[in-house]
Structure formats: structure tokens, C-alpha cells
Amino acid sequence: MSDTASQGSRHIRDIGSRLWIISIWTLLIFFIVNLFGIIGSVLMSSFATRWLRSWLPSGLTTNWYVSAWSEFQLSDILFTTFQVVGAVVLLSGLLGVPAAYAMARRDFIGKRAVMLLFLLPMLVPPITYGIPLATVLYQAGLGGSLIGVILANLVPTVPFVILVMIPFIEQIDPRIEAAARVFGAGTLRLFWTVLLPLLLPGVLAALLLVLVRTIAMFELTFLVSGPTSQTLVVALYYSVFAAGVRAVQSIDAMAVIYMAITLIWLIIALRFINPTQMVTRGKQARA
């Protein structure tokens, strides 16, 4: 009797686990199909001549990309975007890598509080600190300027570089640095000849991820940008919601350009590092 009951309970558990697996896969497939459906519809619309009451447009053309380039002044917007991204990436590396080295190699009072402070800009939604940050920048006369956009984007990117670089620095044996100093290497020479070659994969990975993050950063850029300091994602928002009548196809063409730029840089970043490697490096360093 007990064997029959145990077999029945085991059978019920097997059915429950199978239903759970089926439901998870169903939701995952539903999400993927919807995602590719949305992306595919935007992509198809950017090439469509007319698309009404049918699964496929009546014709294809590239004129909408030409129209979007001239109508939205994409050359100026892309130049501004690359200026902001380049400055943010450079300053994040110059500020974040030395700070990460100090956090990895030095123990001091309040270190955990400082680490928590670095985590906050990535855990808290940007809009919560973006509004007071924008207020301060406008009071300082930097609101609406290119410098203001760069400073606003540095708030989450510098802590991001620090947190990404700490595991890479911790895996380097401090005895290597001590040996270099014994042989007469100064701080600058130690950094360029010993540390930088070892940290280069981590630095490249962190900066490439900062690049992708800055291109996609909307809230902070939107709050502090002006007519001449809009990045591509903010310009895309204004093209959709600003006053006036615009062709949907030209807006979709602009969206495809934005998606393509972001995707290309994300693929390049993922070639340098697997996201799971950062977790593995951190565990190895603590061990």
C-alpha cells in the first residue's frame, strides 16, 4: 500500500515538474517570438513603400533612410553621439581603473560603504537621481551643453568600470608588483610595463560595455541635453513625440540605425569577454 502511494506521489511530482518546464519554455518562446516580431516589423517598415492590411508591404525602398538622414540631421546627431561616447569612455577609464586598483589593493575604514556608494547608480533607476543631477547642472550653467551630458553619463559609468575591474585586479598576484619595485620600477613604469598588459583584456571589456551603455543611456541624457547636445537615442524619442507630422517609415529607419549601432558594439564587446567570466574571476580572487 505504501509503495503504491509513494509511486503515485512520485508520478504527481514528475507531472508537476514537466508542466513547469513546459510553461517556462512556452513563456520563453512567446517572448522570443514577440521580440523578433517587433524588431522585424520595424525593420520591414523602414524599407516599405506602402504597408496596409497585408502581411508584407507592397514594395521595398531605401528612400526612407535617405529621408531620415536629411530630415533628422543624423550626421550632426551621430557626430554628437560619438563625441559624448568617446569622452565618457576615455574619462571613465582614466578615473575608474586607478580607483579600482585602490579599492582592490587597499583596506581602509568605510570600504564597504564606498563600495555600496558605487553600486547605487547601477541599482537605483537613473530617473531618481537624474532629476536632482540635472537641476545641479543647470544651476551650474552646464545644462543643455555637451559637457553637461558627459558629466551626467559619468555618474553611472565610472562606478561600472570600478566594479568590473576589481576582479581583474584582484587576480593579479601582488608579488609581481613587489618584484617589479625591487628591480627599480617606479609607479608609472610599473603601470605601463607590468599592470597594463595584464589588465588590458579587462580594460577593453569594461570600456566597450561603457560605450554600449552610454549609447543606450536615455534618462540622464534626456534630462540634461539641449538642441545641440542630443545623442541618437534622445533624438529618436523627439522624432516620435515632438510636434509635427512625420512619416512612420523614416522614424523606423532612424530606429534601425540606432539598433544596428548598438548591436554592432555589443557584439564587439562580447567578443572580448563572456559576462560569466567576471563572476568566476571574482570567486577565484576571493578564494
Image: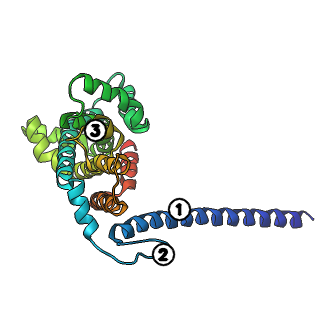
| 3D distance between C-alphas at marks 3 and 2 | 41 Å
Q: Nearer the viewer, residue 128 or 265?
A: 128
The residue at 73%/66% (across/down) is 14
The residue at 8%/36% (across/down) is 186
Inspect the image, locate mark 2, and give the three-letter code of the amino acid beneath it. Answer: Trp
Residue of label 3: 153
As helix, strand or loop, the secondary structure at mark 1 comes to helix
**Percent position of residue 75, x then y:** 17, 55
Inspect the image, locate mark 1, and give the three-letter code of the amino acid beneath it. Answer: Phe
Residue of label 2: 55
- Quadrant of the image containing the N terminus: bottom right
Q: Is residue 213 visible?
A: no
* Mark sitting earlier along the chain (2/1): 1
Q: Are marks 1 and 3 in contact (CB under 8 Å)?
A: no
**Comparing marks 3 and 2, which lies closer to the viewer?**
2
As helix, strand or loop, the secondary structure at mark 2 comes to loop
- The answer to whether residue 186 is above or below residue 232 is above
Mark 1 Cα within 10 Å, few/some/many (few <14, many 20+)?
few
**Percent position of residue 269, x then y:** 28, 57
| 3D distance between C-alphas at marks 1 and 3 | 31 Å
Q: Nearer the viewer, residue 211 or 100?
A: 211
Mark 3 Cα within 10 Å, few/some/many (few <14, many 20+)?
many
Residue of label 1: 31
**Percent position of residue 79, x then y:** 16, 50
- Quadrant of the image containing the C terminus: top left
